[in-house]
């Protein structure tokens, strides 16, 4: 142990690395305090501002995104309602157009039917008038032929107008009576 004790005594004059020098500890505390002051005074407030700005930006961005999403949903709902209204209005317009077309069709058919009836009536009247004219012409011609033929058969001239008319009228009356009796 002697050797060990001698060494320890010899080293007392020298610095022991296990124990720090007190002046270094004081300088370390002063440097640490100065570093803490600078960090607390200048760096930490800026970091806090930056952090708050980032939080505000993120929360504001989320809030703005939620607001825009709500606006988009409201607009989407509004457009959906407008589309439904437009579809309903289009269906109503189509139905009205179909009803109007049916009414027009009915009116055209009614007018065409009236026109057809008018044309048929006018045709019948014209046919009746033409028939009566033809019957009159035929009767006159038949009467003339009958008088000429009767004059040849009888051998006497039936030129006298009064006699001729009486003969023709009698002949025509016989003709009118004949088909009525035959029917």
Image: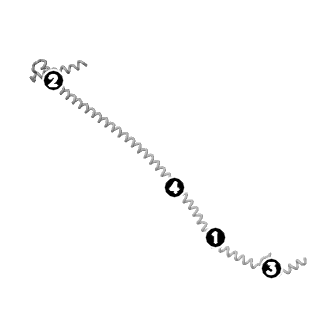
Badge 1 local density, few (<14 within 10 Å), some, or many (20+)? few
| Contact (Cβ within 8 Å) of mark 1 with mark 3 | no
Residue under pointer 2: 145
- Residue 147, picture quadrant: top left
Q: Nearer the viewer, residue 76 or 101?
A: 101
The numbered mark, 2 or 1, whose residue comes first in the sequence reads: 1
Q: Position of residue 123 (x, y in %)?
A: 25, 32
Disc 1 versus disc 4: distance between alpha carbons? 41 Å
Q: Position of residue 19 (x, y in %)?
A: 79, 76
> Which circle's residue, 3 or 2, is located before the other in the chain?
3
Looking at the image, which residue is at 49% across and 50% down? 80
**On the image, numbered disc 4 is attached to which residue?**
72
Question: Could you give the CA–CA distance between mark 4 and mark 3, rounded to whole angstroms?
Answer: 77 Å
Farthest right residue? Answer: 2
Residue under the point 53% across and 57% down: 68
Upstream in the sequence, badge 2 or badge 4?
Answer: 4
Disc number lying in front (1 or 4): 4
> 88 left or right of 118?
right
Q: Is residue 69 above or below residue 47?
A: above
Q: Position of residue 85 (x, y in %)?
A: 45, 48
Q: Disc 3 marks which residue?
A: 15
Tell me the residue that label 1 is attached to.
Answer: 44
């Amino acid at each position: 142990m002697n050797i060990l004790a001698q060494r320890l005594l010899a080293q007392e004059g020298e610095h022991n690395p296990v124990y720090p020098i007190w002046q270094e500890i004081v300088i370390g505390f002063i440097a640490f305090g100065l570093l803490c002051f600078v960090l607390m005074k200048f760096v930490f407030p800026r970091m806090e501002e930056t952090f708050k700005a980032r939080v505000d930006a993120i929360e504001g961005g989320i809030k703005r995104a939620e607001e825009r999403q709500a606006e988009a949903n409201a607009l989407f709902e509004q457009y959906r309602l407008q589309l439904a209204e437009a579809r309903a209005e289009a269906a109503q317009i189509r139905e009205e157009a179909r009803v109007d077309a049916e009414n027009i069709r009915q009116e055209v058919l009614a007018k065409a039917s009236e026109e057809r009836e008018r044309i048929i009536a006018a045709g019948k009247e014209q046919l009746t008038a033409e028939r009566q004219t033809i019957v009159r012409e035929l009767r006159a011609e038949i009467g003339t032929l009958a008088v000429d033929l009767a004059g040849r058969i009888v051998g006497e001239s039936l030129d006298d107008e009064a006699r001729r008319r009486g003969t023709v009228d009698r002949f025509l009356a016989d003709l009118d009576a004949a088909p009525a009796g035959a029917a």
